[in-house]
Amino acid sequence: MKTKLFLALGTLAITSGFLNAQTTNPAPYCVAAPGNFLADEITNVKLNNLNNSSTVFFAGSRYVFYNSVTVPTLAINSVVNMSVSVRRHDCMPDFLGAYIDINGDNTFTATEYLGFVPPVTLFTAPCGGGGGAFPIVTFTFNLTIPNTALPGVTRMRVIYGNSMNTPVAAASCFTAPANPSSPFYAGEVEDYNVNLVTGAAATPPVANFTVPVNVCKNQTITLNDNSTNTPTAWSWTLTGASPATSTLQNPAITYTNAGTYTISLVSSNASGASAIVSKTIAIIDCSPVANFTVPANVCKNQTITLNDNSTNTPTAWSWTLTGASPATSMLQNPVITYTNAGTYTISLKSTNSGGASAIVSKTISINVCNVGVNELENDEAKNITIYPNPTNGAFAIDLKSAGQVSIYNLLGEQIFIKQLQAGKHSLDITHQATGVYFVRVKTENTQQQVKIIKE
């Protein structure tokens, strides 16, 4: 319903309407009938899960019973916060408060005026000035529900008025006087149903929940709701997670990326919603770091075992073994063989429920290792015999002819050189590290080389 009303306020003309009015019949409660000057009005009422906006602004009913909006649940023997927004016409002394029929006798008495805004607070609040400036101001106050209240659905009356005199508390019927200079000559009254109950369900929840620790990316975790006062509904905001929101009490979620994220919860029951509670959760990368051991002094056709040393408890392995048999493996510690000497690459990627590691690659040197057999660069004659081979570092060399004897390590570094005559000689490299060495003999016509292994 929309109506139009023109008031003589200088040249001001205002058009307005009122919203959500359900009935003006308050039976069996008394009719509230403030005066006709309706710039002073209630624009919003909030109480737990009740949030009702309305306006009349110079037009419409001065009393409304909102009998089909949300019915808030209030705990007996508790204090409940209430918020009321009003449009203030002038700066006259006002009054604002709420009655609840706590004994169910269909009347409002002075002892049932359970909460109000102090007059001094109203008097100092912003108010209307010239030119039709009528500010809307929000006030909050507490309703004290006594332990003598009877449980059940009953009536609440919210009153807001303008008075030339300080109003009395028991003004619930708010009858407009004939003389505008008397109390209660302008304002609005709104009625609501409220449900008075006992127990935890009468109070909105206090949201709370448990954040798991040591959470890995790609790990499925469950958030445990610990809200008090028996919530019946939950609203989770799960930034960075899958799913990103949930209405379950204890949602199962997963994060696919490491980092720090915020989890927020609002829990609700019939009495209203909790404040938002937020906590942070740290997600770490628990995927493996691949690593393995490459054996040294490996001969062709020798069977060797690769030892996985990956961290973070991998459960799967992927080996690439170029030049080896087999060429790939899914075992943790594969057994392999190389049939040809040379330098080859071994690569490993290890995996667990947290994800896969980066690929790690290392090289392996495969040697001929023909013990006691000369490896000749010039095969005109076999001039060298070395024994024992492998050796602990002390070995004998038997030369058929004189020559220059030199010894090199795998890096090509010369560690010994001497001119020796034909015959047997004792050489010693015990001070060198274990590994493969090359003994090279250079004569006038030949250059020959033998590979030895120092153990």
Image (cartoon, rainbow, N blue to C red):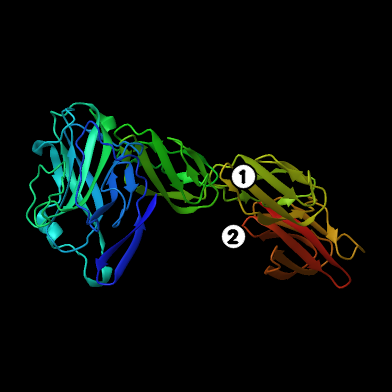
C-alpha separation, residue under disc 1 versus residue under disc 2: 43 Å
Which sits in the foreground, 291 or 281?
281
* Residue 129: percent from left, percent from top: 21, 69
Secondary structure beneath dot 1 equals strand
- Dot 1 amino acid type: Thr
Task: Estimate how packed mark 1 is, as few (under 14), some (14 to 19) or many (20 or more) residues with alpha carbons within 10 Å.
Answer: many
Is the residue 124 above or below the residue 372 in the image?
Answer: below
* Residue 283: percent from left, percent from top: 47, 49
- Residue at x 84%, y 58% (from the top left corner): 375
Secondary structure beneath dot 2 equals loop
* Residue 241: percent from left, percent from top: 51, 47
Residue 309 seen in render: no
Residue at the disc numbered 1: 351
* Residue 296: percent from left, percent from top: 67, 52
Residue at the disc numbered 2: 431
Task: Estimate how packed mark 2 is, as few (under 14), some (14 to 19) or many (20 or more) residues with alpha carbons within 10 Å.
Answer: few
Q: Nearer the viewer, mark 1 or mark 2?
A: 1
- Residue 224 is drawn in which quadrant? top left
